[in-house]
Amino acid sequence: MTPRLSRRTMLRGLGTGIALPLLEAMEPVALAGPARKAAAPVRMAFLYVPNGIHMADWTPAATGAGYELPPTLEPLAGLRGDFSILSGLGQRCANSNGDGPGDHARAMASFLSGVQARKTEGLDIHCGTTVDQIAAATIGRTTRFPSLEIGADVGKTSGTCDSGYSCAYSSTISWRSETQPLPKENDPKLIFERLFEDGRPGESAQARAKRDRFSRSILDFALEDAARLERTLGHSDRRKLDEYLSAVREVERRIERAQRTTAAGPAAMKKPDGIPERYEDHLRLLADLLVFAFQTDSTRIATFVFANEGSGRSYSFIDVPEGHHDLSHHGNDPAKQAKIARINRFHARQLAYLLGRLKASREGDSNLLDRSLLVYGGCIGDGNRHDHNDLPILLAGRGGGTLSPGHHRRYEPKTPLNNLFAALLDRVGVKATLPETTGRLEGI
């Protein structure tokens, strides 16, 4: 009989602790069928894209399950039964409400909080606790990390980034409290080390130097432990463990390649270790790391920012050389709108990659996507008008059987976005009163 393993079992080696995915040997023997499903964890992730969307290419014409995918969402065609589009939701506190310009800063700050950001360039920043951190305060107590905050752009906590608003607002989506923004990590190498190495900060300088000198994989330090564990596992668990460790090694190699590419460039072009030169590679590495975090149950709450609000990133690799923010003020120019739509479609491809990775990750008799709640979108609809009243919101996953995806739902105009978040918190067993709510969003 295969010995039972703790869900917290790790492979250990010199300065290394590799968390494992859920194996059959970890599942409680006494649980089966509905009881096992009820005991399975549900994850939450919030993914953000900035500067608005070309809504004409985002919003389906019809509602219900038979809608035709609009152009922006076509990259998700193979997953259309795994997500819903929610139209008509708004975030009132992203509006000016007497505070003048600064829509980009207010958008990022209020997206998950539903609170009006205090207009300040100084240290007296003030917003509200975000829904991810409300969930993490309860759910995060059961995992190694209460939450994971990642993104492709660095997070700034000082300086002015938008019309008198601190940079903390336009680069931070997650707030632990009204005055404590949680900076995101954008370096895949550092995220990888946080997830897979227990050599920080406890690892000795000698061990760290040895690892760097020989450029060895973290798996090399845990092979003996892995071999020992495999001898105790059944056939399906051995196969799953091999596939998982192969995926970890591949991500590690991609990070190493990014480091070599960075080191080879001129000094003026140096980037932090582990950040690929290509934006798409960067986003996909971050997506893989988020999947690993969920797969190993290292955390059940995550935020993933594709780019900071107000981002001026060029997308020349898809023939859009102009800065994203400048293009978002398109003035109804069809050529500029087409370029915005191209950027939106690129982002949708990255979302499709993440959802596909989650769906391919088996967990018991289900998969990670079915056991997740993912919100993708932004707090600006049409970027030209800085509209916060009809937001691009996509809800993916089945939440452990609590969601019915595959639809386009249209709600009354300006329905509070926090109504959705309140409904999602209910589904993960977190009881909270959110600002701006008028009820729980129905029909999801």
Image (tube, rainbow, N blue to C red):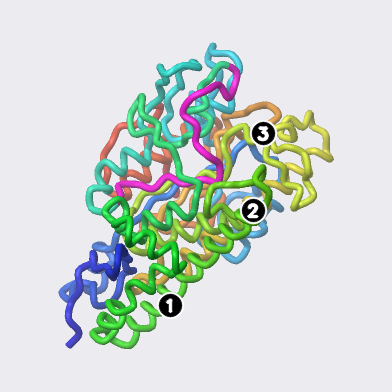
Would you name the residue on which mark 2 appears? Answer: 277
* Count of marks, rendered view: 3
Q: Nearer the viewer, mark 3 or mark 2?
A: 2
Q: Which comes before the other along the chain, label 3 or label 2? A: 2
Q: Secondary structure at mark 3?
A: loop
- The residue sitting at 34% across, 83% down in the picture is 238
Q: Position of residue 275 (x, y in %)?
A: 56, 52
Q: Amino acid at mark 2?
A: Glu
Residue 176 vs 120, above or below: the answer is below
Q: Is residue 20 visible?
A: yes
- Label 2: few (<14), some or many (≥20) within 10 Å? some
Quarter residue 364 falls in: bottom left
Give the residues drawn in magenta, as a range: 145-163
- The residue sitting at 58% across, 24% down in the picture is 161
Would you name the residue on which mark 1 appears? Answer: 243
Q: Amino acid at mark 3?
A: Asp
Q: CA distance from mark 2 to mark 1?
A: 27 Å
Q: CA distance from mark 1 to mark 3?
A: 43 Å
Q: Position of residue 25 (x, y in %)?
A: 24, 77
Check residue 162 for magenta coloring: yes
The answer to whether 411 appears left or right of 322 in the picture is left
Check residue 201 for magenta coloring: no
Q: Which comes before the other along the chain, label 2 or label 1? A: 1
Would you name the residue on which mark 3 appears? Answer: 382
- Label 3: few (<14), some or many (≥20) within 10 Å? many
Viewer-side residue, 169 vs 51: 169
